[in-house]
Amino acid sequence: DRRVDVDARQLTLDRALEVLAREGNFKLSYNADAVPTDSLVDLRAEQARVRDVLEDLLPGDIVVRSNGDHVILAVDPLTRERHVITGRVLDAGTRMVLANATVVALQRGSATGTDGQGSFTLKLKGVVEGAPLLVGRTGYRDTVVYLGMRTSDLQLMLTPLSRLEKVEPLCVYERC
């Protein structure tokens, strides 16, 4: 539980990591391809734990491991795991397949459309349990579903929008 005092602004991340290692008196190892070393960061810490400072500086998919005077930054294998989400989009009332529906992985920036059989395939990285999917199609209510443990052969149901009947104007006080 080493503690450091550091105040540096607008450093590249690789330079900030060097400063932190020097001030904390430890050796630091990491794969430069996995860490965005050219990002500009501010490094401010007063009697802060080195682990806390590192976790604030680094992307969420990097884990901090230590062994004596050596700190190792590694990619969390769970965040790099790839998943293939498959399923079909159906009309909730008729159970008919819905072609041309859109399936969007919210917070992930991935999207796909359904084919003529209402089927879709979506590729995601990282932990998918609890990940929200937005499903939509013209004439249907947009629906958000949350992924569970199961990621294949999903059946996603959309409810048709209510059809409004044509309404004749009602003339009141001769204003028509």
Image: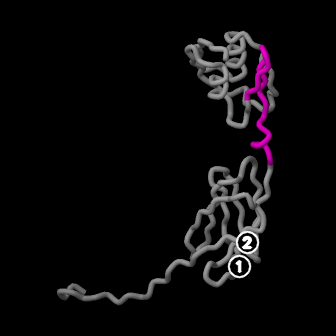
With respect to residue 38, does 142 lie above or below?
A: below
**Segment tinted magenta in the rendering:** 64-81
Q: Which residue is mark 2?
A: 88
Q: Residue at x 63, y 24 (%)?
A: 52
Secondary-structure class at tag 2: strand
Please tell me which residue lies in front, 42 or 53.
Answer: 53
Image coordinates of residue 53 in percent, x first then y, are: 63, 23
Which quadrant would the C terminus be assigned to in this image? bottom left
Q: Are marks 1 and 2 in contact (CB under 8 Å)?
A: yes
With respect to residue 15, does 102 lie above or below?
A: below
Image coordinates of residue 51 in percent, x first then y, are: 67, 23
Give, as a three-letter code, the residue at label 2. Answer: Arg
Secondary-structure class at tag 1: loop
With respect to residue 71, does 114 lie above or below?
A: below
> Within the magenta stretch, is there residue 59?
no
Q: Which residue is mark 1?
A: 97
Q: Residue at x 57, y 14 (%)?
A: 47
With respect to residue 68, does 108 lie above or below?
A: below
Please tell me which residue lies in front, 41 or 169.
Answer: 41
Which quadrant would the N terminus be assigned to in this image? top right
Image coordinates of residue 100 in percent, x first then y, are: 69, 72
Image coordinates of residue 76 in percent, x first then y, are: 77, 37
Q: Residue at x 69, y 72 (%)?
A: 89
From the viewer's perspective, tell me whether residue 101 is left or right of residue 45. Answer: right
The Cα–Cα distance between marks 1 and 2, rounded to whole angstroms, is: 7 Å
